[in-house]
Image (tube, rainbow, N blue to C red):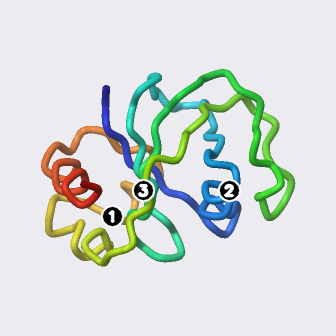
């Protein structure tokens, strides 16, 4: 099992509402190497913080969250990321994450995996 952080662009899709109403989101498989059982944390673009913990439960799925997209949702194959927990504090804001090894900025363009110090800190906040 691996830990990942992805950038949830709320200008394109209302990921928070999809997780709250569906209990999952669909995440594009292209250029992503998630495995079933991996934990994926969502860094929310609008709030500039990690807010959701999800787990990869399926691959090669049709997109199931199309209604939450602002424009037409891509018709690509996706991973299913099931809701695990929502974080409501302030310890996972961008400035706090930077103190624990988060690089921010361009590092958000691709899913991030290899940062043990950062993920240890994030995991503690979700206990």
CA gap, disc 2 and disc 1: 25 Å
Residue pointed to by mark 3: 108
Badge 3 element: helix
23 relative to 86, above or below:
above
- Horizontal and vertical percent for residue 17? 66, 63
**What residue lies at 62% left-to-right and 67% top-to-bottom?**
10
* Residue at image location 77% in from the left, 58% down from the top: 69
Which residue is drawn at the image coordinates 68% and 64% (left, top)? 14
Residue 22: % across, % down: 69, 50
Along the horizontal axis of the image, is 71 left or right of 103? Answer: right
Residue 91: name its quadrant.
bottom left
State the mark number for residue 10.
Answer: none
Q: Quadrant of the N terminus?
A: top left
The answer to whether residue 65 is left or right of residue 57 is right
Dot 1 surroundings within 10 Å: few (below 14), some, or many (20 or more)? few
Q: Which residue in the structure is indicated by mark 1? A: 104
Callout in the foreground (3, 2)? 2
Neighbourhood count class around disc 3 (C-alpha, 10 Å): few under 14, some 14–19, many 20 upward = some
Neighbourhood count class around disc 2 (C-alpha, 10 Å): few under 14, some 14–19, many 20 upward: many
| Mark 3 touches mark 2? (CB < 8 Å) | no
Which residue corresponds to mark 2? 18
Q: Is residue 59 left or right of residue 7?
A: right
Q: Are marks 1 and 3 in contact (CB under 8 Å)?
A: yes
């Amino acid at each position: 099992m691996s830990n990942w952080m992805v950038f949830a662009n709320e200008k394109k899709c209302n990921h928070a509402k999809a997780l709250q109403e569906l209990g999952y989101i669909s995440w594009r498989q292209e250029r992503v190497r998630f495995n079933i059982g991996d934990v994926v944390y969502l860094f929310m673009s609008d709030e500039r913080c990690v807010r959701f913990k999800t787990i990869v439960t399926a691959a090669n799925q049709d997109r199931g969250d199309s209604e939450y997209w602002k424009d037409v949702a891509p018709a690509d194959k996706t991973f299913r990321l099931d809701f695990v927990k929502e974080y409501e504090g302030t310890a996972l804001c961008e400035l706090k994450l930077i103190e624990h090894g988060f690089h921010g900025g361009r590092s958000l363009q691709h899913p991030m995996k290899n940062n043990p110090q950062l993920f240890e800190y994030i995991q503690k906040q979700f206990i």
